Image: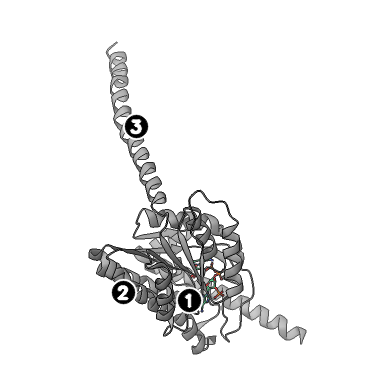
Amino acid sequence: MSEIRAFLSNFNIVGPISLAVTIPWIMFKMFSAAWLKQGYNELVGKVVVITGASSGLGEALAHEFYKYGAQVILCARRRQELERVRTDLLHSQCRETTYPPIIIPLDLSEYHNLRTHVDKILSITGRIDILVNNGGISQRGKAKDTLIEVDQKIMAVNYLGTVALTKAILADMLKKKRGHIVFISSVQGLVALPDRSSYSASKHALQAFGDSLRAEVASENIHVTIVSPGYIKTQLSLNALVGSGRLHGEMDATTQSGYTPEYAAQQIVKAIITKKKEMVLSTLLPKIAILLRRYFPFLYFLVMEMRAKKSTLKDLAVNQDNQKKE
Ligand SMILES: NC(=O)c1ccc[n+]([C@@H]2O[C@H](COP(=O)([O-])OP(=O)(O)OC[C@H]3O[C@@H](n4cnc5c(N)ncnc54)[C@H](OP(=O)(O)O)[C@@H]3O)[C@@H](O)[C@H]2O)c1
């Protein structure tokens, strides 16, 4: 009898406990939803500069910002592709009042000229609220086979150009005491992979620059978000440079199976409006690699060594095949 009484008394506790957990949880969810909605609403009329807006993730980001009423400034080298993106945006469905997208053709590797482009944008819009540093190129091949000119090119686009543009825009943000700077880094900015020495190095450099900058400008009401994506299904591997400097020209299976650019763009815009300081946008495996590198480095070194050996064997097999054909 006493056991039954004890059993029933458990129910008396379970009820209040589940209420005590559920009600704050529901309130938290409602508060988060309202906060997010306000964040999206605040994008209306914001001037958002996006580099690498002529394809892939940058293009998807342009659509996501435009959808919420932002004035997007599309930057990349290929004017024709930027015009295509602008036309697509103008024909897309928008919930809010829209501002016509502006095209600014620029080459990040010509980093001494970027200030002129920033002056042009400011002369049109008067301010820049958000800068999304997304433009970049990848690389394939062993460090020993990679020309130093390729390292220079990757650093010039992914790091120096991005830093130069950031500095040119930062000056105006500091004057106005507000702004948000976003760096699209990579999981490879946190863990380096074999056959990607130049790319990983450029993204590690970007990661460090962003971390330093975040601390320096926090008191000036300027936010910094670093996004580290895993794989996204874009043209990145097709446009990657091999050791000699020519294009890799192949769609890698990992890139092909990555997140869609649209999904990645949605998550990134959400991270920006909630002012996240950093976000790893990936599946579980890259996140495990990041943890291994930090807490179990010997395991990470071992896995990477095995990966490098596998790729060397693959290269050897390809070379032998080519020699047989000749
Ligand atoms: N796809 C992935 O799996 C993945 C994973 C992690 C991180 N990311 C990062 O995401 C960003 C976007 O890449 P994506 O995946 O969308 O690849 P993508 O389709 O190849 O896009 C790269 C963009 O960068 C621009 N770009 C390249 N060189 C430039 C230069 N010298 N000056 C100005 N713009 C330049 C390209 O435009 P133009 O050719 O017209 O100049 C293009 O719009 C990159 O920073 C990349 O490192 C991608």
Task: Say few, some or many: other residues with alpha carbon within 10 Å of mark 2 (under 14 / 14 to 19 / 20 or more).
Answer: few
Q: Is the residue indicated by label 3 positioned so its CB lies within 8 Å of ligand 1?
A: no
User: Residue 199: which disc?
Assistant: 1
Which quadrant would residue 184 be assigned to in this image? bottom left
- The residue tagged 2 is 171
Task: Please provide percent x and percent y for residue 310.
Answer: 57, 73
Some atom of ligand 1 lies within 8 Å of the CB belonging to the residue at label 1 = yes
Camera-nearest residue between 253 and 112: 112
Q: Residues within 10 Å of mark 1 (few under 14, many from 20)?
A: many
Q: Which corner quadrant holds the C terminus?
A: bottom right
Tag 3 residue: 22
Query: What residue do we see at 53% from left, 81% from top?
Result: 142
Residue 307, visible in the rendered structure: yes
Mark 3 vs 2, N-terminal side: 3
Q: CA distance from mark 3 to mark 1?
A: 46 Å
Residue at left offset 58%, top offset 62%: 233
Residue type pointed to by label 3: Thr
Tag 1 secondary structure? helix
